[in-house]
Amino acid sequence: MVLALDPAKILPQDCCAGILIGRVWLPGEGPAVVLVRDDGVFDITRAAATVAGLLNQPDPAAIAAAAPRDRPIGAVADIIANSDAGARDGDRPWFLAPVDLQAVKACGVTFVRSLLERVVEEQARGDPARAAAMRASLRAEIGGDLANVKPGSPAAERLKAALQQRGLWSQYLEVGIGPDAEIFTKCQPLASVGLGADIGINPRSVWSNPEPEIVLAINAAGAIVGATLGNDVNLRDFEGRSALLLGKAKDNNGSSALGPFLRLFDGSFSLDDVRRAEVALEVRGTDGYVLNGNSEMGMIGRDPAELAAQAIGPMHQYPDGFVLFLGTMFAPVEDRDVPGQGFTHKPGDMVTISSPKLGALVNRVGHSDQIPPWEFGALALMHNLAGRGLL
């Protein structure tokens, strides 16, 4: 399936009114930090050799806006069109994930709906055939109680005690309404794929799904400086079998997608825009299957700033900064094929995650052992930049 990489949909609705930072692969050279503007895409690597370095400056938005535009790479539409991994001209530039040396972290069960689905996975032991019955039982027991409970509050503690007495407490409920958020490492720096790339699922998984999320960009000082879109691809059967399989369920070749661009905070875009954002998901299969869903960030259980504060501080530092997936409320439960089996990905699925001020991230699903392997890591980046005289 050819990816629908329409610039009018990939770019934010206000187009380039904000400061859009990206990364582009330049054939014959390597990765470049770029500024995306109406009049083209400009290589600003000489002003900021890495996105991590740019975001750790006192005012990254000002540096990006003032960077020389003497190295145009091409038209935005042309580079977007060439970013489809299945139809790419390797002699022309294409977009990469818009972050590089930052750690890639993720929050789990930050929305009530996805919280209940994690409990379903646990109770069903990763068996999708048992999920429907468990889902109905849990919603009847606790669905209404959770909707208005603030995590870590006295009311949450009382609910926890009541659920324990009823034998319904879960490790997912602990991080969903307890004082400590679930924050885990999604993948290694530079392992995330970008716009148009293939995303990966383990071929042994029979229950997998996309997790459309907003992703914060946070510098080494803990300041939130921008945001992008992300797909925290998940294997529900692996995680449901055991929480100790979280790494295998979450971290596979191509299982972290970020993009299309990183939008820095400025007068046109702020953390309040993230708090008010709506995130849409569309999955289109080669079999004609279509799935649509929407998430509202206003329904998140913990404020994005609180999640960021729990990730960095006296207990944990990130000298290169980090990005933080904020969690998803979207957990597809509709049957795709067999009644009672729910939704799972199939190779060839086209996944589009979009939000008005962040644009659209489009990827194609494949098996992690069949899509292009990850080969360009931190050591390769350092050698490359040094060889180009950029360090």
Image (tube, helix red, strand yellow):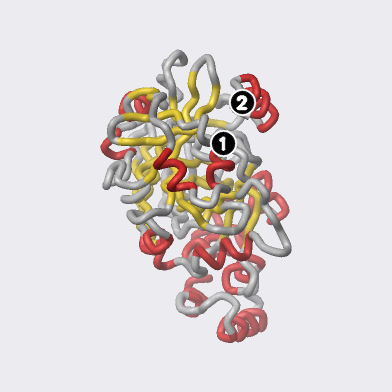
Q: Residue 131, position in %: x, y?
A: 53, 58
- Find out whether the residues at labels 2 and 1 contact each other: C-beta distance under 8 Å: yes
Say which amino acid is labelled 2: Leu
Q: How many marks?
A: 2
Give the Cα separation between the discs numbered 2 and 1: 9 Å
300 relative to 221 in the view: left or right = left
Answer above or below: position of 275 versus 87: below
Image quadrant where residue 22 sits: top left
Say which amino acid is labelled 1: Thr
Checking the image for residue 385, the label placed there is: 2
At 49% from the left and 25% from the top, the residue drawn is 25
Q: Residue 325, position in %: x, y?
A: 53, 53
At 52% from the left and 69% from the top, the residue drawn is 302
Answer above or below: position of 70 versus 207: above
Residues 157 and 161: in front is 157
Within-10-Å neighbours for mark 1: few <14, some 14–19, many 20+: many
At 66% from the left and 67% from the top, the residue drawn is 171
Residues 349 and 215: in front is 215
Image quadrant where residue 76 sits: top left
Q: Tell me if I can see residue 250 in this picture.
A: no
Dot 2 falls on a residue whose secondary structure is: helix
The residue pinned by badge 1 equals 50
Within-10-Å neighbours for mark 2: few <14, some 14–19, many 20+: some
Checking the image for residue 348, the label placed there is: none
Residues 69 and 212: in front is 69
Mark earlier in primary sequence (2, 1): 1
Image quadrant holding the C terminus, namely: top right
Q: Tell me if I can see residue 385 in this picture.
A: yes
Q: Residue 252, position in %: x, y?
A: 62, 38
